[in-house]
Image (cartoon, grey):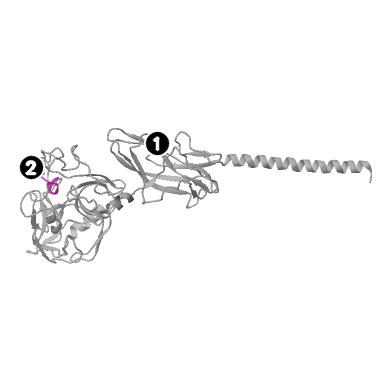
Amino acid sequence: MSWKYLAKKTINIKTNYLIIIVALAILVVVGCFSYAIFTVSSESKGSLNIVTGNLYSHLDSEELDGKKSIVIPKDESKIIHLDLVNVNGVDAKVNLYYTATSDKVEVAYLEKHDAVPSKTGDILTKSGTKTDHKTIDIKITNLDLENEVTVTFGSDVGLKNASLSFPTEKKEIQKYKGNPYISKAYIYNDDANSDTYCLTGDEESCQKTDCYKLPDEEEEKEQDSQEKPTCQPNTIIKYAVSDTEEKVFYVIEDKDDKITMQQRENTIKNVAWYADNEINTNGPLTILEQLGNETKKWDNVLEQKYKMGETTFNNNIFTGCSTYNSCSTNTYTLGEIKARARMITVQEAATLNCTDTASSCPKWMYNYLYDSIKNGATVDDSEAINEQYNNGYWTTSADSTTQNNAFYISNQGALTSAKATDLYGTRAVVEIKK
């Protein structure tokens, strides 16, 4: 073998080794660069369109501004709807947190949709798949009675196998305990001369109550041997019956972590108890149909299932009453009813001290009716006409002394009987969880 051949072969081998070494070096550099690209980084200036190399997460919410912030006025609360989305072509791990300009704020997610990601992050599959996002409802409550608060949301994102640490300067979003759709509750007081006068829930002198709040674990232990807080009858509750509607209600009963309450104003105006004829044996079919249509989108109240003549309301199953304190006849029988709202019964009204005497009912029960300003109403309806403010509203109880009548709450604050074809209002009675 010639020397030139050996030299040439040696050079070729060295060249091959050199090529391999260079290729390995390039792979190492690319690998390190790729690792740097996919290393997790926090958000910039509060934005939730977070960039982690070429990984992104996106938060879509109509309630937040461009900086993913929202301002909550003093002593107010708001429920916001968020979509946390993985917009990448690969699976990614994301988390979610917030900052606030005040410590006097509560930020918690609701059970209605998805839970927030854990502190170490949850995996969202690649963009375009069914599990590439989380839909999250969050309630923000400003506990400050003097100042507004700004809350800003943020997120981190990384590869699904990456270690995602929670930033120490950010705050975790806890799970909401209790009913998030109660915005406020007040102690009822119809004494106009009192410093704590509160007839409608809109007076500045109203005093708040937390009677609807469930105790935390520590409080629950302390209350094991004590009576748990309950909302007293007449307590005023402002409640979001749906995502777009808030109504004012008064408590009829608080029992077993469930509150029964009646709407402040008439839900329906000028409706017959039963329009086809004056016979009350068919039940309040006309009202129930209209009430069902009016409240069918009240998704945040419990669906009630009841059968008149069998279901107990205030320890009494009967549908017919001869007087306010004597209900012992099943005047009519309907099949099982499923609805978001029903009507108050004479038996329930009696627990609130309603009798056949004028002004026996609490003032809220005959407020917001025609000419009710004479009875302590804060709404000046002296020029109102019956099409706007009824002379009363129906109960679900028939008058068992006749086949023609049913009971209603009059604008004078008494339980009164009238023909089933007469026109009065109706006020929704709903049930909610505490």
3 vs 369, left or right, is right
What is the magenta range? 363-376
x then y, percent, for residue 189: 14, 43
Residue position for label 2 = 374
x then y, percent, for residue 5: 91, 43
Nearest the viewer among 169 and 8 is 169
Residue 310 visible to an observer of this rendering = yes
Q: Check disc 1 and report its element: helix, strand or loop.
A: loop
Residue 299 visible to an observer of this rendering = no
* Residue at 61% across, 41% down: 34
70 vs 42, left or right, is left
369 magenta-colored: yes
How far separated are the C-alphas under marks 2 and 1? 47 Å
Looking at this view, name the residue that lies furthest to the right.
Answer: 2
Residue type for callout 2: Lys
Q: Which mark is residue 226?
A: none
Measured along the vertical axis of the image, is residue 195 above or below residue 366? above
- For marks 2 and 1 on the same chain, the one whose residue lies earlier in the sequence: 1
Q: Check disc 2 and report its element: helix, strand or loop.
A: helix
147 magenta-colored: no
x then y, percent, for residue 42: 49, 38
Residue position for label 1 = 65
Question: Residue 55's image quarter?
Answer: top right
